[in-house]
Image (spheres, helix red, strand yellow):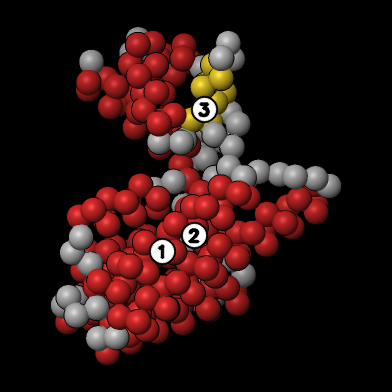
Amino acid sequence: MTRAVDRVYAHIRDAIVDGRYAPGARLGEVEIAELTRTSRTPVREALRQLEMEGLVEVLPHRGARVYTWTADDLEEIYDLRMTLEAMAAERATGRIRPAELDRMDELCVLMESATADNPDLDRLAALNDEFHAIVRSAAASARLVSMLGAVIALPLVMRTFHRYTPTDLARSHAHHRDLVAALRAGDPVWAGSVMRAHVRAAKSVLLQALAADEAAQGGPVTVPSDTAV
């Protein structure tokens, strides 16, 4: 049973993260059971797990659906991420190894190349994930890494680069360079400040995108799931 639940859980979660199950989409137990070749019991258990994580909401007499993200969710999640990422950067100062800093320098070059001429935003996102993972690992705090993992795995934090303008991307690249410089200098205050500005800028991009979407549609809209710094 556990293996079946894990398989169904992974199927639903991956589909939510990559947008196959859009915000508000109904998650029918029968349909998912057929897709995953299992019974409804593992599907029901997987949906309960996803509800606890905030990715799914189960409505009485209406079944389950993908949670719809709002501007308030965006504010809360990015403020939490800003605090945790800054703490990780501060802790990483003095702990990060020279080889890790060298790799971060390489990643800066690769990320800048990924946005030159014909931008490859999926590659940029993967490189960015590695860059930030180095900082989190160097922070040497299992609890902090666990808390951050729960936040950055949310669909709302995924694929933010798809909403970035060229100016936004240039600013993000500059933040990355500044962060490496702060870590090399062994200055935790500087490193934390750069990371706060970095995540705050990402939040601003998404809030502006949401406001533009609302203006275009003539009313409130939800934050799309295909939206990390």
Give the vertical position of 214 relative to 141 (above or below).
above
Identify the residue shown where x is 48% and y is 45%: 155
Q: Are marks 2 and 1 in contact (CB under 8 Å)?
A: yes
**Residue drawn at x 58%, y 42% as measured from the top left:** 69
- In this view, the residue in front, 138 or 16, is 138
Q: x, y percentage for residue 41?
A: 35, 11
Q: Callout 3 environment at 10 Å: few (<14), some (14 to 19), or many (20+)?
A: many
Query: Left or right: where does residue 151 sit relative to residue 133?
Result: right
- Give above or below for 129 relative to 9: below
Residue in view at x 20 percent, y 55 percent: 142
Q: Evaluate whether residue 216 shows in this view.
A: yes
**What secondary structure is marked by label 3?**
strand
Q: Position of residue 12 (x, y in %)?
A: 42, 30
Q: Secondary structure at mark 2?
A: helix
Residue 110: give x, y in percent of width and height: 37, 74
Determine which residue is flagged by label 2: 79
Residue reaching furthest to the bottom? 185
For residue 36, side relative to residue 65 (left or right): left
Residue at the right extreme? 218
Measure the alpha-carbon separation of dots 2 and 1: 6 Å
Please give the name of the residue rendered at 36% of the width and 28% of the height, measured from the top-left corner: 49
Where, by quadrant of the figure, is residue 178 drawn?
bottom left
Name which of mark 3 and mark 2 comes first in the sequence. Answer: 3
The crowding category of the residue bearing disc 1, from other C-alpha atoms within 10 Å (few below 14, some 14 to 19, many at least 20), is some
Residue nearest the observer in this picture, 192 or 103: 192
Residue denoted by label 1: 83
Q: Quadrant of residue 195?
A: bottom left
Q: Which residue is mark 3?
A: 57
* Element assignment for label 1: helix
Q: Which mark is residue 65?
A: none
What amino acid type is highlighted by mark number 1?
Answer: Thr
Q: Circle 2: is it few (<14), some (14-19), or many (20+) Cα within 10 Å?
A: some
